[in-house]
């Protein structure tokens, strides 16, 4: 286990569970961020205030510090990764890049997906950028032995994040008895991972020499159809979901941004073989089924009405799409 770890970010949906577990397991943890997150900093973490996109502020915050492990939670483009390579070469024993399982071939040629599945997503720019980041890191490893590790989360959530597009607006529609759009026929399989479960697979990678030069995905072994996902959320909210199925390509024609995430990710069945991460983290076990996760989400929104933001634009779009297939 690494003793001195730097998280770039560290207060996001996934990292907010990994930070306290890293501290619990004995890491000396530093968080480098702008200090503007609504999530609290875990007790014991040391905060370095800087904007990772501003090299001057980062160099000032880091000084001459070096680390056993650096994790960048918020790198999205090859330019971000190149800046990391330049900044941390010679200053860390391991650099962990948070990529995305959406980088895998879409749709996959076979299931379950393993780490050797081809990276290829022609539909979603976000995923193509993540692939380009991985390629830059692999080159740096091959040419300069930059000590990189790649981690590919799939759909990872916490109590603040509903699993479908339009978030609280869709939950609000369910509770008002209005129909909700479900992409495709709702039968494609999906994997939802609670962030506390993800952390149990992630933290053992930190400072682990066996993980250098390797890529891992970390996901739950619970597979659910999208019909089930909508029904589970509705049940947690005390209602039934009136689901209307709309083809993903129809959604894409009317909302290209929503459609890109569907065609490049959610509309395809995605289940994962987690054997590789379990070999390195043998105690990795996901213990939060989505039925429990959905209960946590609904309780969080219900605890403060201000947390629920209804988008009239999203409402109008769903109504329009439902009218097209009705």
Image: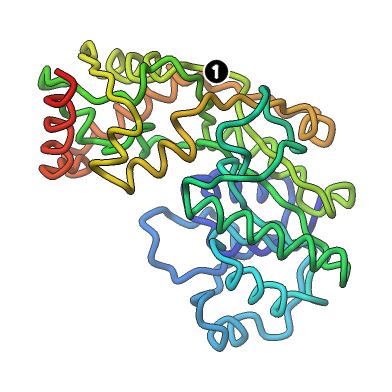
Instruction: From the viewer's side, name the closer residue of 162 and 282.
Output: 162
Image position, residue 219 (x, y; %): 62, 31
Q: Is residue 248 above or below residue 216?
A: above
Q: Residues within 10 Å of mark 1 (few under 14, many from 20)?
A: some
| Residue at 71% from the left image edge and 57% from the top image edge | 96
Tell me if 206 is positioned left or right of 163 in this view.
right
Kind of element beneath mark 1: strand
**Rendered image quadrant of residue 104:** top right
Quadrant (top left, top right, bottom left, bottom right) of the C terminus:
top left
Image position, residue 50 (x, y; %): 51, 77
| Residue at 55% from the left image edge and 50% from the top image edge | 15
Tell me if 125 is positioned left or right of 257 in this view.
right
**Rendered image quadrant of residue 321:** top left
Tell me if 325 is positioned left or right of 280 in this view.
left
Disc tally is: 1
Image position, residue 238 (x, y; %): 23, 13
Instruction: From the viewer's side, name the closer residue of 92 and 46.
Output: 92
Q: Is residue 55 above or below residue 228?
A: below
Q: Is residue 249 above or below residue 15?
A: above
| Scheme of colours in the image | rainbow
Instruction: From the viewer's side, name the closer residue of 82 and 34.
Output: 82
Image position, residue 214 (x, y; %): 81, 48
| Residue at 52% from the left image edge and 48% from the top image edge | 16
Residue receiving disc 1: 223
| Residue at 74% from the left image edge and 63% from the top image edge | 137
Instruction: From the viewer's side, name the closer residue of 175 and 324.
Output: 324
């Amino acid at each position: 286990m690494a003793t001195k770890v730097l998280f770039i970010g560290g207060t996001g949906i996934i990292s907010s569970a990994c930070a306290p577990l890293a501290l619990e397991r004995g890491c000396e943890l530093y968080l480098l961020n702008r200090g503007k997150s609504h999530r609290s900093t875990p007790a014991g973490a040391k905060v370095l205030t800087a904007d990772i996109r501003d090299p001057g502020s980062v160099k000032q915050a880091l000084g001459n510090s070096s680390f056993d492990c650096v994790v960048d939670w918020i790198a999205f483009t090859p330019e971000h990764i190149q800046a990391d390579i330049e900044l941390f070469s010679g200053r860390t024993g391991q650099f962990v890049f948070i990529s995305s399982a959406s980088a895998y071939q879409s749709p996959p040629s076979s299931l379950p997906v393993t780490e050797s599945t081809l990276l290829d997503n022609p539909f979603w720019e976000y995923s193509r950028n993540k692939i380009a980041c991985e390629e830059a890191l692999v080159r740096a490893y091959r040419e300069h032995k930059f000590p990189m590790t790649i981690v590919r989360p799939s759909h990872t959530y916490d109590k603040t994040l509903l699993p479908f597009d339009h978030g609280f607006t869709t939950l609000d529609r369910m509770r008002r008895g209005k129909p909700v759009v479900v992409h495709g026929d709702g039968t494609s399989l999906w994997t939802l991972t609670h962030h506390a479960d993800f952390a149990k697979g992630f933290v053992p990678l930190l400072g682990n020499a066996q993980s250098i030069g390797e890529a891992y995905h970390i996901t739950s072994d619970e597979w659910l159809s999208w019909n089930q996902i909508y029904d589970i959320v509705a049940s947690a909210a005390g209602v039934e979901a009136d689901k209307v199925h709309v083809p993903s390509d129809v959604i894409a024609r009317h909302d290209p941004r929503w459609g890109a995430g569907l065609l490049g990710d959610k509309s395809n069945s995605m289940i994962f073989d987690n054997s590789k991460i379990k070999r390195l983290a043998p105690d990795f076990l996901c213990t939060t089924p989505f039925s429990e996760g959905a209960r946590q989400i609904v309780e969080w929104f219900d605890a403060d009405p201000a947390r629920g933001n209804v988008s009239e634009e999203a409402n109008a779009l769903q109504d329009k799409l439902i009218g097209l297939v009705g």
